[in-house]
Image (cartoon, rainbow, N blue to C red):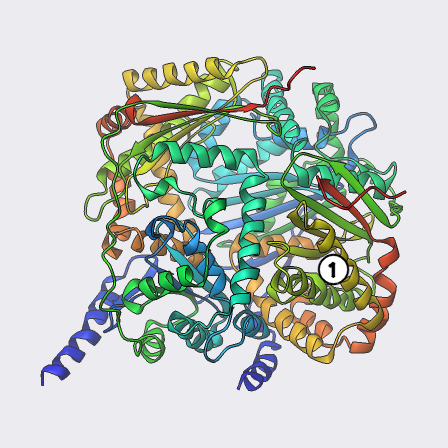
Amino acid sequence: MKLFLSTLAAVFLALPVWAEVKIQEVTSPGGIDAWLVEEHSIPFTALEIRFRGGTSLDAPGKRGVTNLMMGLIEEGAGDLDARAYARKLESLAASFSYNADDDSVSISARFLTENRDEVIDLLRTTLHQPRFDQDAIDRVRAQVVSGLKSDAEDPNTIAGEAFSTMAFGDHPYATDGKGTVDSVSALTRDDIVAAHKNILALDRIYVGAVGDITAEELGALLDELLADLPAAGAPIPGKADVTIDGGVTVVDFNTPQSVALFGHSGIDRDDEDFFAAYILNHILGAGSFESRLMSEVREKRGLTYGVYSYLVPKDLASIYLGSVASGNARIAEAIDVIRAEWTRMAKEGVTEKELQDAKTYLTGAYPLRFDGNGQIAGIMVGMQMQDLPIDYIATRNDKVNAVTIEDIKRVAGELLKPDELHFVVVGKPEGLETTN
Amino acid sequence: MIRAFALAVAVCSAAPLWAEQEQREEVTTFTLDNGMDVVVIEDHRAPVVQHMVWYRAGSADEPVGVSGVAHFLEHLLFKATDTLESGEFSATVAANGGRDNAFTSYDYTAYFQRVAADRLELMMQMESDRMRNIRLTERDIATERDVILEERNQRTDSNPRSLFGEQLNASQYLNHRYGVPIIGWRHEMEELDMEDALSFYQTYYSPNNAILIVSGDVEPDEVKQLADKYYGVIPANPDLPERTRSQEPPQTAARRIVYEDARVAQPYVHRSYLAPERDPGEQEDAAALFMLAQLLGGGTTSYLNEKLQFDTQTVVYVGAFYNGTSLDDTTFDLIVVPSEGVTLQEAEDAMDATIAEFIAEGVDAGDLDRIKMQLRASQIYARDNVDGIANRYGQALTSGLTVEDVQAWPEILQAVTDEQIIAAAKSVIQPETSVTGWLMREQEVTQ
């Protein structure tokens, strides 16, 4: 019975369920490209704008400046100081949120149809004329520093930073984009103004919009909002070499449960074997309760609440990571089981049943991602940044289904390197010591 | 004749409600013959459904001495039943392209799956199966107990803020089970056994103690038909106990706690006050408290934030919180994180002085209007996320509220007056019912 249902699902769900939702490519009169899904049933629009480069554009010695700048962009603009700005935004019932990561900064806006023009006017002022008042700089800097101090006592953050330092050498990826207490404390208003110019530029912009707006309306909106930004920003750094070797690094930290972050080099998003790697990773450690790691470490042995692996294809380097947390007395056993599974997968690949189950899941789950205007706008921007074609959604499941068991076996042998797997363990792990 | 009449009522009682639901959230509700409540929230934009079953049983319903058993049982429901092997439930959901999980709180335990719309029947078949038919082994008990202990390690013991919150909560409630952590106290979790789990299961897992909530690309008629087929055939539990919990006595002494931990990088003050919850048909006081939290500490323009972060640089963060969706007395909470060089005492004093000023000055009409406007807009945005609406119904219906209460809530919020808010503030801000907690970095012993 179950087999029958699964087979049925595979046949049905492989169809491009979202074929009826059309992504339009819109080019504004001023030449700004965007992807649009018109969805007029709810009177609001989600707009996602991203600029490539992110915190990796921080000038030397100015670590944390892009992050601080993005935190300050909503702290007053034009003739509105921070308080007046916040009141204005609230009175429009719109929301703007800002984010900065290694590879991009993003602005996610959500606004009602009824006052769209007013909202866009405010967002335009925000992007073009942020005030960066000194009192706002001091206030937001204090918030960032407070967060950094808390991060310094957080086992997961400690593990992440230790791993990045080892993996990325002197590349910006090696350090936290939020900066350090010292580097953030030393930033000046001039540094922040420079960071703003470096990244909010038209040569690196990507836009997605979903909601109650037509292509024509969006085109006009984009010109109003963005056309006057500088043509070019700062150059994006070169690729990073992943330099980490196999071994264990223990970071002593007084806590009852050790956190382990592990990994080695990964695979690029545009590699022709990416889909094979993606399925492989799903079976190894991304497939929730069904993954091999979850089954062996949690379900069979009760060694953890959760263990996961992740492909991390960034713009300038790709790594393959995993994480687990276990009581100090049991983390060594958890690590042994993970190593064994990494090795078994590298040697044997996956079974036909695992491959079929993974394909059924991945192709069936794909349409479930497109739930909500903001979510879809974000996905569309991600697709543009990865240089995927506009019809990608309709063809993506075919690419998953085309992967063979031989592909996976070959890619497993290349991608998984048990000897290069490095574990950073933060805690008081019993029976584990730093290797050289 | 009588039987036919009863059937007609059952069908009709659903129909007029649908007709009434001309409001913007497309919500339909009805009750199966065995007492199981059903809520359907339609959104036909994508061929996806979320199927949830909520039980009116959470950690506050546990017997004394077995804290954590509600959550432990939640984990065990992913093991075997008469017809499914251990793990097969989630594996089947995954093999159908879906995701499943579950969560436990003080007043409820809920299970859900998100799948393509045409998989709904299979979800109902499996979920209704594990309502009555789980089959556990001693090995399941031993392994899964280790998992929940690691979960406690991860969520609570590794995090000084969580440990602090646990102590604060335990100090707030003198007699009610809300003072016991949902995940359980470690020493009691370590002793949880098969009998504890099965006893909780047999007592509380039945259709007359459950709510089915389906959201997404479904028609209410289809849900009704499937629900009758899978859940409707399960007999009601005639011995379902009433949810009477030991209530709080009058609280007459302000409490203070200091929690010190070497892992604390950023000290802060957390104050909680015992507060009334939303009651069926009487949500006005709770609505006033909700507005009070927004006005006092709900965002950048809130009163505390303006005074303590803009006018003076006393804090790097301040917030006020009130969650009225609770079966019994809840809390009104304030958090202040002092700026560098400001002591916890100074931050606490500034917070208290500022709240007193707020009460003396009264509510700014412009501030209140702006919050009401945002709440109206949030009803439009909410329609983009029907799963969020599903959660709202689930939490309310397991907390003693009715569908009518949920639907009346937005209008009650809009009707709140400045006098009601100040009255609510005066009523809830009572030192005797409060706990003031300081989270501090452990002072290192000098050699």
In the picture shown, does residue A214 fall above or below B297? below
Q: Is residue A67 left or right of residue B44?
A: right
Q: Residue B317, position in %: x, y?
A: 51, 25
Q: Residue B151, position in %: x, y?
A: 56, 50
Residue at point 35%, 52% (across, down): B62
Residue B266 shows up from this direction? yes
Residue at point 69%, 36% (across, down): A229
Occupied quadrant, residue B403: bottom left
**In what element is the residue under mark 1?**
helix
Q: Is residue A44 left or right of residue B367?
A: right
Q: Nearer the viewer, residue B185 or B20?
A: B185
> Quick one: label 1, few (<14), some, or many (20+) residues within 10 Å?
some
**Split into 4 quadrants, where in the image is the C terminus of chain A?**
top right
Q: Nearer the viewer, residue B203 or A135?
A: B203
- Picture mark count: 1
Q: Residue B137, position in %: x, y?
A: 51, 70
In the picture shown, does residue B442 fall above or below B164? above
Residue B383 shows up from this direction? no
Q: Nearer the viewer, residue A195 or A6?
A: A6
Q: Is residue A64 left or right of residue B441?
A: right
Residue sitting farthest toward the left = B1
Mark 1, chain letter?
A
Occupied quadrant, residue B446: top right
Q: Which amino acid type is marked by label 1?
A: Val
In the picture shown, does residue A187 fall above or below B112? above
Residue at point 73%, 80% (across, down): A352
Occupied quadrant, residue B335: top left
Q: Which residue is mark 1?
A: A337
In the picture shown, does residue B28 fall above or below A78? below
Q: Residue B264, position in %: x, y?
A: 59, 28
